[in-house]
Image (spheres, rainbow, N blue to C red):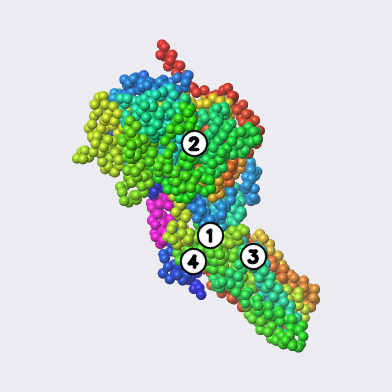
């Protein structure tokens, strides 16, 4: 039924799912280096897909009052304040009578604010505040010594300041764990290679939620079903652009044929390196990564985990054949034990 | 900026350093020493450095004194965090399972059903009618409970039958559904066949009375054939997720569950069946204990960081409890001899250990998903490993 | 810009992709700063010091576009020898009258020119914000002027400018603005290096710039820089205002202002414009050069559009029907008059003064003292519920049971529910189709006013009272359609465009308007928008099917011109300054001006044309004078007339400032409009004592997630949840100084009020070093009020009322305050709390900060006597 190579490695998902002459795989390229954090993507998505509001919670996570991708937010704009320079940017606060940075402190307090009451698990608080502090405190936390400019260190004055913004979304993985583990067939692969939940099929078993290596898909309380970005299946089917990409004013969110987007992204990252932004890097673009490449990939300016993304996700089903083998052995062991126990002297 | 220093002087120095490239030469201060500056004209007398002090969630609406006691001049103790990594506001990266306690409960009842089906078959073939009867009834009851738990846990219980739309090898839950769907009726028939002897010897019912034993045997053997799969697939069910402590433990989980299935079922048998017939069951209990203890020991030792949740927190506590119950139960099974009381007590201990194991494993996984540490650190390590490999 | 104009900002990002360098100068590190190459923090209210520093940088290093400056600006013009500069008078210009607090600009005149009629009435000019009438044309100055094109004459504008700005050195900029010298030089270098023959720079400001007691002079300084660098009238140049929301440009062209009529014709003043002829002459200035020579045609056509056949030459086209100004009827004067019970009724159309205007408390108290208020809005906003739900109800100043104001709430149609035009900052009219019918009782403004007029006229029908004639004689015949009798918006646009009375043929250009009553036109600068009976504003031709200027997309006033004064894109001989920047140039063969845009010049007037000595009007403009609306055809570096507060910009501290003016003895704008009333206390500033009671600077601004006073965003869940609560942003340093907690509560206090806000501690705010002090700034969004899903206290409640003398726009972008942790006292206790602050600050009902803070005037007066 399933060949092992359908579970891992670079493939074209739509044909693999059985579509004959499927259209080219479509996806998103989110270039965070031009994101201005306007959140038009969040609103456009909710307007088009009739997603419920996520509630009025001041999270204090810089300007992020959405907090995470949840059943009620299919686009999420992250805001990260760091006392670090952005490329060759002139130090923003140099020459002003500043003290030490407050970013880490702010992030720590914001790490435990409760929010998004209507989804499960939604946006849980941080178990420990330090990782929040490290996210906002600058590179020394990432164990990269020697990259510091004077005045950025604790005790001294802050001179550098950068404000990262990034619009996160479902990755529409080549190997989508949520889809593979779904016991009802509610989650399915579209002809465009995207992954969509059929709300009339989903029975809320919740298996897809812990299966997602990115923590995207989420359950809506009261409703009981799992919800996530559909890459506007109903729009792209009509040749339209997904609502978020349509609304994005700066082309930070680009929609198109995945292969073309990957090319464009490569050129963009090279351009940024040439322009003196060495920290620019692509994320989720590589067909050889743990999920066979994302249908929605990103250009980031810091480590993925700073944006709340896993640094090296691997689809859990890669090991599924091995898992079944182990389960088989265990089953035989169990049967043998019983046999021995009864056959032995009575 | 020290008082009276010429304005912009630092900026000039900074640019000079940029020019002569000496920037970055100075190694970074430890973040943990930051902000211990003394109050001055414009250096705040306040510690802005990251704290490891825990803040209880809640009170977000009020704000007010949240992060309380951070008043001017106060200092919390600063301790070095165990592992250094960063995460978006420290929030979890993964979404933890939304399953309620139905699922760990099902893990237990499913295992119990599987084990008792096997014991029933064994008893049947080796002529232990009381044991067989007890096991068959227990098995049916456990299957009933399992079905209830599984349906009750759904977000949309009225749609439980959607599970039967498809059969997917990639979805352990789908596989399990089909195992249950087949094993259930078999075990049911086997259990029902036990009423045979109570039926009148004549007429239609008499016919039923006559065919009950052979039907029961066939059904019982069919159930027994499927039982090991039912007991062990649940290991895959948990492992086939992104939950770090579950996935990393995939080689052992099926053995843990097989072992604890044997423990629960033998325990149940020791409680319900006369000691005269439970000899094999006691031997089986020892085997189960051996399998379970070895497998769970491997999990706690082999896994490294993601093994932590099995040793600490709720998961750790429950698994420690489970272990001591296993030892007690096994000892009872070994030395209990023909004492009915001891037999019941040690049986109860074994059943208890199985319950504790399932809930322990469940909570360990949930905790590992809720803490970004278990997601980020191993993946970082993997990347660095890959880099160093390519370097070589 | 990324915060308030994210959609327009896409072009900045596009330019950045192509290698443009983006600078962002702001007291706050915003979403714009996040993507800028260089962020320049600045003390709110010190912009003229920065821009003046750049003017000096240009002049000291002779970086000006000399040929352009000599030929096209008044740099070479000689100024009267009576002129005295702020350098001589410690921050005042010559002609200051301490009694009225205004200038007599006689001494600012070009050499050898008699002051013109209006000149003496500076007080009246301020009362009526008459400077605004010059938005589209220069004030009166005679054409011929003494010039020294070597720019060496000590009294030529160039030298005066040089001397005036000589103090604005990088050191001074650093001391006044808190901008490190290196950053200042980075900005100055980038601006100048990107200007000249081959390159041009656009200056884009947002309307926050206007909201200062010296707002007009902020923009003047920007204009001076652009003129010196040759960035006016050329592609890629100019000064653009990003308006606060859709069609604000339109609402000044066809004004919602008390002192203007459509097309920037002045509202008649009872004394100055007693007769039709006085009025017309005051616009046309007989003998004056430039396009305003035809003012009578524009005025006559407007009156014909109002009163149709009832407007005849015999009755001066109904001029006596026109209401007359008697003084200051600006919005803030109105509000104070309401408090005094002098005004009975109020129309609010898509406006929410209870939240959006300065001194919210005065706004609400005023409205609570009316007989009736009509609110037309999409939602039930604070200005409709102030009587039952406002801070004053809490303090007991408004008692719902006793508040006699009758509120009529009229649900309004949104912009997608009605047709019409938007006129945006680039003067481009774009027609909007109606997308959906408005729900329920929602109606368009057009519907409301047409039917209101119709009903009033029906009620008055048959009245013989003289006072009712103006209404009864109105031409009020717009065709309507649909079940709701919606007036035809295109018919209105047709009337605005203007038409021949006899034939009804729409005119195609304002030159077709006549002064004999044979044409009617609602707004002369819009003439042509309905040329050939076609709605030109509705044109949507693809840019790919036309020239890069895209003249067939919408329609721009005047005459579909996309760049004003574009004659300046060619050199005096009519040749392009450079191939790269070629735009409009003289074609000797054809004998006409050609280019991708409509020439802003008489099409066939050659560069060599020199006017005969006695020429006036258009004929008086020489072939190399691009600024055809100016009397002398030149761009004004120095404004001899037209501005109430001086011929050149000077750094004055805001009306409320924690620091003494580091440059002059004169602390703040000496001509600013103040209202000395007990409900309008002003925080003390140096040299007054106790300014330390309000030690911090605060500014207010907008968030991307919300819209102005929140009426269109706080009422929507999807927007409210993105910024769910009112907050105040503070630096870690200030948080430490005041013991503020991130996400905790704090309250901000001024002499007017105190408001609660959640604290946002962020590195994005940083203290500045001003002189030898550390100055802290905080900022608050002003979107919140007491209605909607997301509620909060209103930042505009913190401001007092102090106005720019030229425009009567309030200073609502900078003030001083105190910030304290925790929530403010509630109920009547709030008043005691404020009172206690006033006490410590020495603010009493009979004491106001002095306007004049230098004795230079009396000194110089004494000199004269000796």
Instruction: Tell me which residue sits at (24%, 34%) in the image.
Output: C605
In the displayed image of the protein, which residue is found farthest to the front?
C462
N-term mark: 1 or 4: 4
* Badge 1: chain ID: A
Q: Say which element carries label 4.
A: strand
Closer-to-camera residue (C838/C863): C838
How much space separates mark 2 and mark 3, taking CA atoms? 71 Å
Residue under pointer 4: A189
Q: Say which element carries label 1.
A: loop
Q: Is residue B268 magenta?
A: no
Residue under pointer 1: A228
Which region is colored magenta? Answer: A250-279
Residue under pointer 3: B153
Asked if residue C326 lies left or right of residue B164, the reply is left
Q: B299 above or below C30?
A: below
Neighbor class of circle 2 (other Cα within 10 Å; few <14, some 14-19, many 20+) is few
Residue under pointer 2: C458
Closer-to-camera residue (C460/C862): C460
* Badge 3: chain ID: B
Instruction: Tell me which residue sits at (48%, 19%) in the image.
Output: C99
* Badge 2: chain ID: C
Q: Say which element carries label 2.
A: helix
Asked if residue C482 lies left or right of residue A335, the reply is left
Foreground: disc 1 or disc 2? 2
How much space separates mark 3 and mark 4, taking CA atoms? 26 Å
Image-quadrant location for residue C89: top left
Q: Say which element carries label 3.
A: loop
* Residues behind callouts 3 and 4 on a single chain: no
Neighbor class of circle 3 (other Cα within 10 Å; few <14, some 14-19, many 20+) is many
Instruction: Tell me which residue sits at (59%, 34%) in the image.
Output: C405
């Amino acid at each position: 039924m399933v060949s092992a190579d359908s579970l891992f490695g670079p493939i074209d998902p739509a044909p693999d799912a059985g579509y004959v002459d499927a259209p080219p795989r479509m996806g998103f390229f989110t270039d965070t280096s031009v994101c201005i954090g306007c959140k038009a993507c969040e609103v456009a998505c909710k307007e088009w897909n009739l997603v419920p509001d996520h509630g009025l919670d001041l999270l204090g996570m810089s300007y992020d009052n959405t907090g995470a991708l949840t059943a009620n937010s299919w686009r999420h704009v992250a805001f990260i304040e760091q006392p670090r320079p952005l490329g060759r940017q002139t130090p923003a606060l140099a020459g002003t009578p500043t003290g030490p940075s407050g970013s880490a402190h702010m992030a720590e307090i914001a790490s435990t604010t409760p929010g998004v009451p209507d989804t499960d698990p939604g946006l849980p608080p941080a178990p420990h505040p330090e990782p929040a502090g490290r996210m906002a405190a600058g590179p020394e936390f990432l164990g990269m010594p020697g990259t510091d400019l004077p005045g950025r260190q604790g005790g001294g004055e802050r001179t550098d300041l950068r404000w990262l913004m990034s619009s996160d979304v479902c990755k529409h993985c080549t190997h989508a764990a949520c889809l593979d583990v779904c016991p009802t067939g509610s989650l399915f692969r579209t002809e465009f290679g995207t992954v969509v939940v059929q709300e009339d099929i989903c029975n809320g078993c919740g298996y897809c939620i812990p299966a997602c290596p990115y923590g995207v898909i989420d359950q809506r309380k009261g409703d009981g079903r799992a919800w996530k970005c559909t890459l506007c299946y109903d729009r792209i089917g009509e040749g339209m652009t997904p609502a978020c990409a349509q609304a994005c004013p700066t082309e930070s969110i680009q929609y198109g044929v995945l292969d073309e987007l990957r090319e464009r992204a490569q050129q963009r990252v090279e351009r940024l390196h040439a322009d003196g932004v060495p920290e620019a890097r692509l994320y989720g673009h590589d067909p050889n990564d743990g999920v066979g490449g994302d249908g929605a990939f990103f250009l980031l300016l810091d480590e993925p985990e700073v944006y709340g993304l896993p640094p090296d996700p691997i689809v859990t089903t890669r090991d599924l054949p091995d898992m079944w083998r182990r389960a088989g052995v265990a089953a035989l062991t169990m049967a043998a034990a019983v046999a021995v126990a009864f056959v032995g002297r009575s | 900026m020290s008082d009276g220093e010429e304005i912009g002087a630092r900026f000039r120095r900074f640019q000079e350093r940029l020019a002569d490239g000496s920037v970055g030469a100075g190694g970074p201060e430890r973040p943990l020493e930051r902000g211990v500056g003394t109050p001055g004209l414009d250096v705040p007398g306040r510690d802005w450095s990251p704290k490891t002090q825990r803040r209880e969630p809640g009170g977000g609406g009020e704000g007010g004194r949240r992060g309380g006691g951070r008043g001017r001049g106060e200092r919390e103790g600063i301790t070095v965090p165990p592992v250094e990594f960063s995460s978006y506001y420290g929030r979890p990266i993964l979404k933890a399972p939304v399953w309620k306690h139905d699922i760990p409960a099902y893990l237990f009842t499913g295992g119990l059903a599987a084990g008792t089906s096997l014991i029933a078959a064994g008893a049947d073939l080796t002529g232990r009618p009381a044991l067989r009867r007890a096991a068959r009834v227990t098995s049916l009851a456990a299957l009933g409970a399992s079905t209830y738990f599984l349906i009750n846990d759904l977000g949309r219980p009225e749609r439980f039958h959607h599970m039967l739309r498809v059969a997917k090898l990639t979805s352990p839950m789908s596989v399990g559904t089909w195992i249950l769907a087949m094993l259930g009726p078999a075990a049911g028939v086997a259990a029902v066949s036990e009423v045979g002897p109570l039926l009148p010897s004549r007429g239609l019912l008499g016919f039923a009375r006559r065919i009950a034993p052979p039907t029961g045997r066939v059904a019982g053997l069919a159930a027994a054939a499927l039982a090991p799969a039912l007991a062990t697939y649940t290991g895959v069910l948990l492992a086939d997720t992104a939950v770090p402590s579950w996935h990393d433990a995939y080689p052992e989980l099926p053995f843990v569950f097989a072992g604890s299935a044997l423990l629960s079922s033998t325990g149940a048998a020791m409680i319900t069946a006369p000691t005269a017939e439970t000899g094999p069951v006691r031997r089986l209990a020892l085997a189960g204990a051996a399998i379970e203890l070895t497998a769970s020991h491997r999990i706690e030792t082999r896994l490294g960081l993601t093994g932590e949740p099995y040793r600490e927190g709720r998961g750790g506590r429950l698994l420690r409890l489970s272990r001591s119950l296993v030892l007690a139960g096994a000892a009872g099974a070994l030395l209990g001899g023909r004492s009915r009381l001891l037999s019941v007590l040690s049986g109860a201990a074994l059943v208890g250990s199985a319950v504790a194991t399932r809930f322990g494993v469940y909570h360990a996984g949930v905790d590992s998903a809720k803490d970004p540490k278990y997601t980020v650190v191993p993946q970082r390590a993997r990347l660095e490993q890959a880099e160093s490999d390519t370097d070589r | 810009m990324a915060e308030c104009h994210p959609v327009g900002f896409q072009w900045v990002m596009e330019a950045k992709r192509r290698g443009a360098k983006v600078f962002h100068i702001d007291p706050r590190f915003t979403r714009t700063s996040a993507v800028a190459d260089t962020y320049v923090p600045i003390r709110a209210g010190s912009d003229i010091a920065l821009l003046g520093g750049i003017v000096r940088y240009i002049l000291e290093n002779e970086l000006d576009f000399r040929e352009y400056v000599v030929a096209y600006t008044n740099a070479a013009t000689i100024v009267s020898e009576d002129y005295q500069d702020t350098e001589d008078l410690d921050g005042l210009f010559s002609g200051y009258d301490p009694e009225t607090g205004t200038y007599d600009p006689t001494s600012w005149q070009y050499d050898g020119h008699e002051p013109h009629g209006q000149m003496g009435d500076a007080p009246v000019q301020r009362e009526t914000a008459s400077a605004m009438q010059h938005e589209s044309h220069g004030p009166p100055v005679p054409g011929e002027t003494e010039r020294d094109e070597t720019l060496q004459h000590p009294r030529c504008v160039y030298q005066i400018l040089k001397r005036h700005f000589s103090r604005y050195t990088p050191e001074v900029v650093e001391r006044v603005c808190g901008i490190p010298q290196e950053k200042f030089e980075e900005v100055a270098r980038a601006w100048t290096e990107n200007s000249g023959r081959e390159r041009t720079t656009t200056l884009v400001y947002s309307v926050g710039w206007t909201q200062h007691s010296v707002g007009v002079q902020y923009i003047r300084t920007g204009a001076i820089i652009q003129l010196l660098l040759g960035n006016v009238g050329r592609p890629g140049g100019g000064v653009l205002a990003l308006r606060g929301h859709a069609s604000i440009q339109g609402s000044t062209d066809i004004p919602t202002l008390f002192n203007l009529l459509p097309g920037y014709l002045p509202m008649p003043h009872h004394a100055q414009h007693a007769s039709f002829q006085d009025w017309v002459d005051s616009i046309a200035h007989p003998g004056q050069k430039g396009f305003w020579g035809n003012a009578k045609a524009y005025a006559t056509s407007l009156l014909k559009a109002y009163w149709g056949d009832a407007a005849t030459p015999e009755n001066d086209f109904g001029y006596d029907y026109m209401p007359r100004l008697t003084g200051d009827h600006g919005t803030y004067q109105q509000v104070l008059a309401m408090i005094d019970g002098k005004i009975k009724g109020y129309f609010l159309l898509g406006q929410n003064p209870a939240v959006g205007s300065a001194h919210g408390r005065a706004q609400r108290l005023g409205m609570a003292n009316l007989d009736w208020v009509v609110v037309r809005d999409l939602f039930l906003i604070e200005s409709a519920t102030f009587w039952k739900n406002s801070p004053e109800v809490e303090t007991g100043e408004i008692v719902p049971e006793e508040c006699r104001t009758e509120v009529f709430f009229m649900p309004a149609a949104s912009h997608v529910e009605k047709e019409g035009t938007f006129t945006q900052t680039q003067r481009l009219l774009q027609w909007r189709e109606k997308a959906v019918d408005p729900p329920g009782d929602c109606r368009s403004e057009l519907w409301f006013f047409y039917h209101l007029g119709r009903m009033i006229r029906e009620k008055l029908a048959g009245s013989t009272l003289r006072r009712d004639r103006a209404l009864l004689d109105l031409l009020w015949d717009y065709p309507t359609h649909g079940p709701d009798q919606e007036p035809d918006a295109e018919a209105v646009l047709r009337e605005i465009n203007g038409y021949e009375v006899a034939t009804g043929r729409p005119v195609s250009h304002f030159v077709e308007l006549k002064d004999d009553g044979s044409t009617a036109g609602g707004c002369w600068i819009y003439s042509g928008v309905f040329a050939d009976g076609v709605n030109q504003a509705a044109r949507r031709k693809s840019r790919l099917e036309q020239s890069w200027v895209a003249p067939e997309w919408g329609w721009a006033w005047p005459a579909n011109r996309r760049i004003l004064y574009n004659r300046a894109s060619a050199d005096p001989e009519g040749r392009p300054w450079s191939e790269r920047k070629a735009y409009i140039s003289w074609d000797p063969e054809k004998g006409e001006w050609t280019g991708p845009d409509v020439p802003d010049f008489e099409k066939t007037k050659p560069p060599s044309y020199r006017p005969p000595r006695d020429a006036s009007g258009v004929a008086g403009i020489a072939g190399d004078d691009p600024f055809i609306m100016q009397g002398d055809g030149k761009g004004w570096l120095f404004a001899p007339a037209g501005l109430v507060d001086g011929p050149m910009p000077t750094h004055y501290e805001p009306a409320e400032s924690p620091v003494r003016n580091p440059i002059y003895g004169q602390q703040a704008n000496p001509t600013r409009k103040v209202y000395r009333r007990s409900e309008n206390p002003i925080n003390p500033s140096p040299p007054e004592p106790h300014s330390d009671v309000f030690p911090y600077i605060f500014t207010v601004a907008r968030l991307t997630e919300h819209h102005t006073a929140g009426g269109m965003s706080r009422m929507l869940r999807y927007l409210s949840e993105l910024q769910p609560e009112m907050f105040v942003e503070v630096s870690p340093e200030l948080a430490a100084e005041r013991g503020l907690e991130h996400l905790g509560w704090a309250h901000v206090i001024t002499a007017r009020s105190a408001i609660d806000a959640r604290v946002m501690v962020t590195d994005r705010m940083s203290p500045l070093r001003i002189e030898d002090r550390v100055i802290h700034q905080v900022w608050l969004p002003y979107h919140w009020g007491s209605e909607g899903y997301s509620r909060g206290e209103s930042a505009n409640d913190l401001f007092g009322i102090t106005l720019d003398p030229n425009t009567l726009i309030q200073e609502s972008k900078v003030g001083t305050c105190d910030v304290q942790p925790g929530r403010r006292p509630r109920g009547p206790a709030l008043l005691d709390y404020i009172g206690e602050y006033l006490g410590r600050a020495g603010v009493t009902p009979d004491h106001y900060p002095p306007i004049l803070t230098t004795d230079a005037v009396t000194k110089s007066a004494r000199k004269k006597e000796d």
